[in-house]
Amino acid sequence: MDKTWDYYVCLLFIVWPFRAIAYLSPIVCTLLAVNQFGYAGPILQHWSVLPWLIYSMSESLFLLYYLWAKYRLSQPVFDPPQLMTDLASRRHAPSSVHDFFDTMVRHTDDIQSFIQEWFYDTPFEELSRRDLQKLIAYVFFSKEWNHMAPAEKVDVNAMIDRLYEITNVKEPTEDATSAQPKHCIRHTLDEFNSVARPWLIYACTFALNYLCAAFLSLAGFRRHHLRQGLGYWHRDAMTRPVGEPLVFVHGIGAGLVLYLPLLWSFLTTHPNRAILLVETPYVSMQLVDDVPNKAETLEALQKMLDTHHIASAHWMGHSLGTVICSWVCQELPHAVSHATFIDPIVFYLWKRDVAYNFLYRSPSTGLQVLMWYFASTELHIVHVMRRHFWWYNMVCFPEHLPRDPKTGHVAASVFLSTHDLIINAAHVAAHLKRGMQSRVDNQIAPHDVIETVCWDGFTHGEMLFHAHALKTISSHVRRRNEAPKQVVATPSWAEFVVNRFILALDLQ
């Protein structure tokens, strides 16, 4: 694909300079040290050399840390969570792997294209059974074909037979397919690709998070630790009558600091709600290695709710944060009154879009190259995506979304960006609509309608920079609960921060 002009601008003035710092620091450090010993030209004055020597040495040491951490975090996972055992506690647990396979097939509009795209669009007729064994073993078991138990191989071959039946394609003979296996995407088994970056980037991230923490503290939030790799901020409702609590889970990036515009919208429009902000530092460039699994995360979140005596809440997630929302909706349904998915990755997750666009696609635009450098190749984010991202325990089928216990209506809303860099929003919207259609007349009953909003022209996360989009989200949350009877004035940023600062001083 042709590169756009902004691709070269971002590459030349942002990505390359940062990469140069990381990789050239050892060379600079060595040259400066040699010079100070008198072996590389006239000795430079110590006062001018010392700051550069210290900085280049620190970057060199950080590069060594990166290489050691990459070796440690890139180790293969030999005991990935298995579909049947991992989904056993789910409200709609599958009865077998074949049952789960059939559900996936029922929600896929073109099975042949679905298979082909995982093989980089290789025609289905050119794929041998050996090729399909490699793919299906990865998709449903997260294993290499050679590492599977005999019973698992029987299941895989049965699913392959079903694929040939569905696609009405005759299985090719060994002579008709090349001896060389076709290459396919297997993100949890493939090579661990990450790129070194200077500690300066992490220092900026830490600084931004400290500023965010200061703001949240002034806004009345208090930080709580759940377990290694998981925490949250909590603020009680400030007005009466009290509405249902709101729980927000951020996505990949730099943590909650990126969501301050949305959080500000919550604070000013929902003062009658308790607000809980879940933090996942392992995808926030915080140098956190520990990644809680699904069971550990759900246990911690239930503890969070119990601590604040919350029976159920409105759960909202963005991007990777929708994974936690999917887990809660399907395994802690009693704790969900409504769920809001923004730029969700949990729908239609068996398609290659998320894995390919985030981990494999060669960037061709400015936004893509920035996402590639600052997210897709960051060591700890790659660790999560390649060693802890099991699609079958994250996916949410449309019929498994929460329901209102009184009306039976779908208690979930979905916000999509039409130009999303990670998911195919059009395919997801069609999938949600198709998934709720009656098998008799292809109509959707009123109680099965999933409220879906598409932001035309937005890319992934762009809603954070548009006031009308933030207003749409906040007003949507308000409609889910009785409007507060007490009128609260909406202060400006400065007025609110000053007010909270004075309050904090009064509490000393």
Image: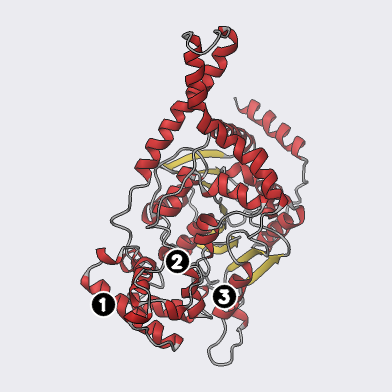
Amino acid type of the residue that numbered disc 2 sits on in the rendered structure: Gln
Q: CA distance from mark 2 to mark 3?
A: 19 Å
Picture coordinates of residue 182 (x, y %)? 40, 69
Sequence-first tag of 2 and 1: 1
At 53% from the left edge and 72% from the top edge, which residue is drawn? Answer: 403
Amino acid type of the residue that numbered disc 1 sits on in the rendered structure: Val
Picture coordinates of residue 11 (x, y %)? 64, 44
Please report contact status of discs 2 and 1: CB closer than 8 Å, yes or no: no
Q: Nearer the viewer, mark 3 or mark 1?
A: 1
Q: Secondary structure at mark 3?
A: helix
Residue 330: image tag: 2
Q: Is residue 386 left or right of residue 398?
A: left
Q: Secondary structure at mark 2?
A: helix
Q: Secondary structure at mark 1?
A: helix
Residue 170's image quarter? bottom left
Sequence-first tag of 3 and 1: 1
Dot 2 alpha-carbon crowd within 10 angstroms: few under 14, some 14 to 19, many 20 or more: many
Residue 431: image tag: 3
Q: Nearer the viewer, mark 2 or mark 1?
A: 1
Q: CA distance from mark 3 to mark 1?
A: 30 Å
Of residues 258 and 57, the one nearer the viewer is 57
Dot 3 alpha-carbon crowd within 10 angstroms: few under 14, some 14 to 19, many 20 or more: some
Of residues 367 and 438, the one nearer the viewer is 367
Asked if residue 32 can be seen in this view, the reply is: yes
Residue 154: image tag: 1
Amino acid type of the residue that numbered disc 3 sits on in the rendered structure: His
At 78% from the left edge and 40% from the top edge, which residue is drawn? Answer: 492
Dot 1 alpha-carbon crowd within 10 angstroms: few under 14, some 14 to 19, many 20 or more: few
